[in-house]
Amino acid sequence: MIVNLIVIAFFSLNLIRSYKTTVIVIVVWSLVLSMMSMPTVMPFNLFQILSVISILIFPFKMKKSEIKANKYPLWLCAAVSGISLFLTNYFAPISAWPMTIAIFLSLFCFPFILWYSLSSPRMVSFFLKSLIVFLLLLTIYGFIEVSIGSNPIIEWMQNSDIFTKVGNSDRARFGIKRIQSFLTYNGAMGMCCGMNFVLLLYIRMYYKDYIVQYKQILPFLLFALAACIVFTGARSVMLAFAVGLLAFARPSIFKYKWTYFLIFIFILALPVLISFLAPIITSFVDTEAVGGSNVDMRTMQLDTAVYFWHKSFWTGNGIGFTNYVIENYREDIYGAESLWFSKMMNQGLLGMVAFSITIVQPIYVLIKNKLTPCIFIVLSFLVAKTMTSAPGITEAYHLIFVVVLLKVAQTYNDRKKVKNDKIQHNSTSI
């Protein structure tokens, strides 16, 4: 508990000293900060606490002119999600206002804070640098976990009062240990690696000035991210990753030299990959062969979720109601392994509509800003969260990626315009 208080104090002081860079660090490490909490003092995790602190400090660190000049494009996601959360809590048999407010601020208002923190090419570059460092640590330890067949860090987390709600993916699938590195569970690991793979590769292809200094290490990081997705043994995140890769499914991809390099490496590794991937491919058809969820199990989960949904059709049974169902109807609901199951039970039809809007509006905004291929990041998130609950990955995790992509494109184009204006001005002067 003392360690967590020190972490909160450290970030709070840095928010006062260097607001934007600290917000960026909080976002990059949010999956780890979400695993840290002080249940004996308050039920919130550290990411929620730091999000609230960041929002409280925001008015003192951001100019009104800056806010008016660069309006947040995902306001509808925050508005409808907020309405759903508050109506659910208002009509629920047992209210949970502090948790409702914490969820709303951390999931749907904090991306707004990130939007204004990524205000310049320097801030965007700092975000990408921080992200690459985080992903390197994540994947390196993932390979260590595969090599030794255990996870000492997770075992330490489970025995520590610093971290809560940490699972231990100690099972094997496809002949390897299912890894999670230092994240909540293997689903969180797989989704984090998959979505960031698409993000970094897209930036490398179209906005490479931002990561040109990492051109030597980036191919190895991308390979490590893809490998760690397979090492999680989670079919849902593998399928979601395949959906994300559709962002690059067009003929123009073959104009890049690294495309041929990856194809060459794939051909060399094909003999090994065939024997390794065969059971994975089979598992999508024969789910009984590898364990995990199957059609009968998912049908029972759906029936149970619909049963409780009908008890409060419009606004649901309350925030956290799914936990009650899991505890008391475990054999029927198992882990409620789809975001839609928990949505219909917790927040009813209004909650499902609100979540749908958090998918549709980002897709619309990306298309409007000529970032159409990036909609597959959002769709990969939707596929993964539909197929599995992925503990550790929130229902608004994809909004961070949308904000980053929009800011990368915006600041890149602004910098390019300034550069062109200078060249034009100099030529006119001559």
Image (cartoon, rainbow, N blue to C red):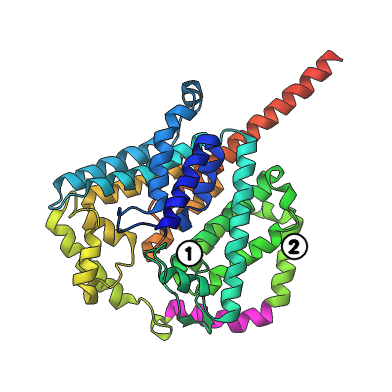
Instruction: Name the residue rendered at 23%, 52% in the picture.
Output: 347
Residue at image position (51%, 78%) is: 281
Q: In percent of the image, x 74 and y 59: which residue is there?
A: 258
Please, what secondary structure does the residue beneath circle 1 have? loop
Q: Nearer the viewer, residue 95 or 258?
A: 95
Left or right relative to 103: residue 226: right
Which of the 4 image quadrants contains residue 185?
bottom left
Q: Amino acid under label 1?
A: Leu
Please name the amino acid that badge 2 sits on: Tyr
In magenta segment, residue 280: yes
Work out whether mark 2 precedes mark 1 in sequence or the reverse, and give the earlier one: 1
Does residue 303 appear anywhere in the picture?
no
Identify the image quadrant of the C terminus.
top right
Q: Which residue is mark 2?
A: 260
Mark 2, residues whose alpha carbon is within 10 Å: few (<14), some, or many (≥20)?
few
Number of the label disc, if any, that sits on residue 183: 1
Whether residue 36 appears in this view of the structure is yes
In the image, the segment drawn in magenta is 270-285
177 in magenta: no
Q: Which mark is residue 145?
A: none
> Whole-percent x and y of residue 251?
66, 54
Q: Main secondary structure of the magenta part?
A: helix
